Image (cartoon, grey):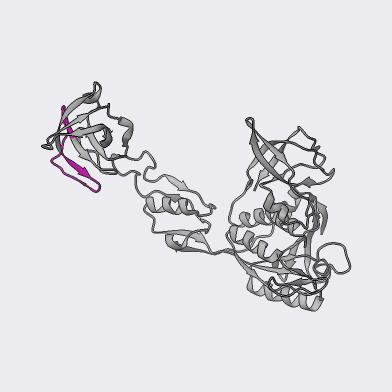
Amino acid sequence: MEYFVSLERALEIAKKVQVELTCTYSLLDEAHGRILTDDVISLVDDPPFDNSSMDGFAVKHADTTDPPTRLRIVGTSQAAAVSASIHVSNGEAARIMTGAPMPPGADAIIMVEKTTVSEDGEWVELQAQAKPDWVRKRGENLTKGQVALSAGERLTPHHIGLAATMGHPSLSVFSPPRVSIISTGDELKQPGEELEEGEIYESNSFGIAGLVKESGCVPMRKNACADSLDELRAALDEAAMESDVIITSGGVSMGEWDLVRKIMEEEGEIHFWRIKIRPGSPPLFGLWKGTPIFGLPGNPVSSHIVFRMLVKPWIMSQFGVEGSLETIVPARLLEDLKATTDCHTLRRIFVYPQEGELVASLKTHQGSGNLHSMVAANALTFLPPGSTAKSGETISVILL
């Protein structure tokens, strides 16, 4: 077991442990939020033919350079239908609808609002020049065979829409790993139950479940586990049998009743305990009955931050995704901020633009039990060990 390791070392150790993931084909209607297993190529050119970007008239641009211009109407091009007999020659125009194929001979579009059609419908007068840029060229978005989606990407609505544009009815995706989530502590009650003296509502499992789902996994939120080695052992055994990963919350610090740490020392396999980040230094990682387990701190802010900085990168590495998952930008501090000498410092801050730069301000109490500080913040400081954080300094921040 390694003790009090850097964030980089913690990730290095954890990523040596791999879970076996399966893949499946998912219909586009069911693919939202899933993770691609392979690159996806376009089966077609997009657009598949030159077409109009608006309703109007297809013309020769050279006929429109000295408006107003009067042209003879020779036909109509509608979406998915263009008459083979239509050909635009000098002095001619064809009606055209948005998305309709460009008729041969035409190279520009003028919007209908800039035209007047004669009463007999035979002629159109153009009050402005036509626009070649209003012609969507074949393959200007994608060409057939082009890789447009990459393995490891999480499918959002625009990914799925693009897959449909490329002609794919289904996609190869990872079957989502199942993640058991177990909060620990005698004092925990479920929201909605009546609290007695000394009790609090259990919240960590709900927040962690959301983070798990955002990471492309299936959360399996368990009832809170009392401070009992027998009950904790039974919960961990059940989780190891029915899930791919276990996440616990609480019980990993140095106290006598930190039973997750205790049972892992005595019966599990710990790969590291404690990492150099603030808040969130107590986590452990290892195996329980062969199943990877992350022991997160019980303080809500700490559990969220540790998940973001440690658990999520590990999960994404299982999907083959490496590198930074965060958007890190510079921001100038408006107040002094407490940094640490030996840890990455991740304070909750609010960033906003001011006079052409981003500035950062503390908005709420920074206690690791204050989950409201995560709601009020839109960024985290990302201060390496030994950094200073004085008013006026520009630091790196992680956008939430």
Based on the picture, tell me whether residue 81 belongs to the magenta stretch. Answer: yes
Q: Residue at x 49, y 59 (%)?
A: 32
Q: Residue 166: in sight, yes or no?
A: no
Q: Is residue 231 left or right of residue 61?
A: right
Spot occupied by residue 276 in the image (x, y as percentages of width and height): 80, 50
Give the image location of residue 112, x and y in percent.
Answer: 25, 36
Observer-nearest of 340 and 118: 118
Q: Indicate the quadrant containing the N terminus: top left, top right, bottom left or bottom right.
A: bottom right
The x, y position of residue 296, in whole percent, is 75, 61
**Image mark count:** 0
Q: From this viewpoint, which residue is outermost toward the top?
A: 66
Report the residue that reaches farthest toward the right: 256
**Residue 271 can be seen, yes or no:** yes
Residue found 78% across the figure and 34% down from its top? 391
Judging depth in this view, the residue of 45 and 133 nearest the camera is 133
Residue 115, quarter of picture: top left
Q: Which stretch is magenta?
A: 75-93
Residue 110 located within the stretch drawn in magenta: no
Left or right of 234: which side holds 209?
left
Determine the residue located farthest toward the front in the rendered image. Answer: 119
Vertical comparison of 232 with 203: above or below? below
* Residue located at (20% from left, 25% from top): 69
Q: Which of 256 and 21 is in front in this view?
A: 256
Q: Position of residue 191 (x, y in %)?
A: 69, 70
Q: In which quarter of the image is residue 252?
A: bottom right
